[in-house]
Amino acid sequence: MQKIIVSVTNDLATDQRVHKVCTTLTNLDYDVTLIGRKLSKTLPINRPYRTLRMKLLFKKKFLFYAEYNIRLFLKLLFLKKDILLSNDLDTLLPNFIISKLLRKKLVYDSHELFTEIPELIDRPRIQKVWLSIEKTIFPKLKNVYTVNDSIASFYRNTYNVDVHVIRNIAKRLNTKTVNTVLADKIKGHKKMLILQGSGINIDRGAEEAVKMMQYLNNIILYIIGSGDVFENLKKLRTSLKLEDKVFIKDKVPYTELMEYTKIADLGLSLDKPTNLNYEYSLPNKVFDYIQAQTPLLVSNRKEVAHLVTENKIGLVIDNHEPKKLADVVNKLFSDKKQYQHWKENLVIAAEKYNWESESEKLNVIFKELK
């Protein structure tokens, strides 16, 4: 049985993409070990593969990445392995060095355009460091996959490397039944909007979603997950006196999260066009909404807009101004015929987009490692 070591910089608990990949590889008879970090509020996990979480001295920025990569290098050096699976640019350097030193096969899963994330665009010197690592290593990679066609094309054109696509599609949700007790408790007769995810960061439209609630009646908003702007959202809610309309929950286990998603009447994905990473993004939450058969309201980003319009499962908007967003939401809920049409199309989309089908591509990639 071949041993695969998978590495990420997060705490493992809410990274559904990596969990799905590790579970699929385990089911394909690989011996999988997943390495990540441990935080003070890390949720407990019980996985069908081994997990290692390192408790680090540093939590943010350069010192965190330096410590993590050194610690990861040492783990990779001494653990038994046949294949290394690096997730995103922040784990690639130690994986690449070990693969060359010990002549092990390396697979790279790029979840996003890492060098184009807003946290780096505003810090050009740090961005340059990451870009230099990418430019040095990426052209030498042989086994690469990413989350959508736009990012794959970007990498192919930039580095002349063959890049496969495995989208962030959710597992088939076998239980579509809504928990009516929870629904009555959470929203009663009100409509419910939801914005979920572990990367609710700057320029992802969360602030506008909160401000929009000033102009909506008999509608509530749930924001569930984590991200750089989470604490700011809580302060904004208080300053606008929206505690009875906006509810903000820290990250919860996936199964619990999906109970809220199924209750919601509208799922939000409101990324702004401030960087290429957001322009090309196709977030996990979009496919969670599809599996929950919750109609979508999304901003006009290339991949997300195409998915929604092609399958006729929601509405694409061009404006983030809170009052106009509220007008769109009111109009959307007033058009019951259109809304029902989206719900019917979501039944088809949920069968079309599921991890059980998408993961077959993973089997092909790992069988043909170079």
Image (tube, helix red, strand yellow):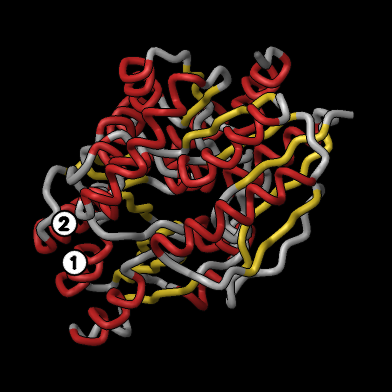
Which residue lies most toward the right here?
Answer: 1
Q: Residue at x 38, y 46 (%)?
A: 295
Total tally of numbered discs in the picture: 2
Where disc 2 sits, the SS reads helix
Could you tell whether 91 is left or right of 330 in the image?
A: right
Does residue 89 appear in the picture of this structure? yes
Q: Nearer the viewer, residue 78 or 219?
A: 78
Is label 1 in contact with label 2 (beta carbons under 8 Å)?
yes
| Quadrant the N terminus occupies | top right
Q: Residues within 10 Å of mark 1 (few under 14, many from 20)?
A: many
Please tell me in which quadrant of the rendered image residue 79 appears.
top right
The amino acid at mark 2 is Leu
As drawn, the label of residue 27 is none
In the depicted structure, whether residue 232 falls above or below residue 348? below
Q: Nearer the viewer, residue 137 or 339?
A: 137
As drawn, the label of residue 212 is 1
Say which residue label 2 marks: 325
Q: Residue at x 59, y 35 (%)?
A: 97
| Quadrant the C terminus occupies | top right
Q: x%, y% of residue 262?
A: 52, 56
* Mark 1 or 2, nearer chain start: 1
Q: x%, y% of residue 344?
A: 44, 36
Q: x%, y% of residue 219?
A: 30, 69
Q: Nearer the viewer, residue 11 or 47?
A: 11
Does residue 270 appear in the picture of this structure? no
Where disc 1 sits, the SS reads helix
Could you tell whether 336 is left or right of 164 in the image?
A: left
Q: Residues within 10 Å of mark 2 (few under 14, many from 20)?
A: many
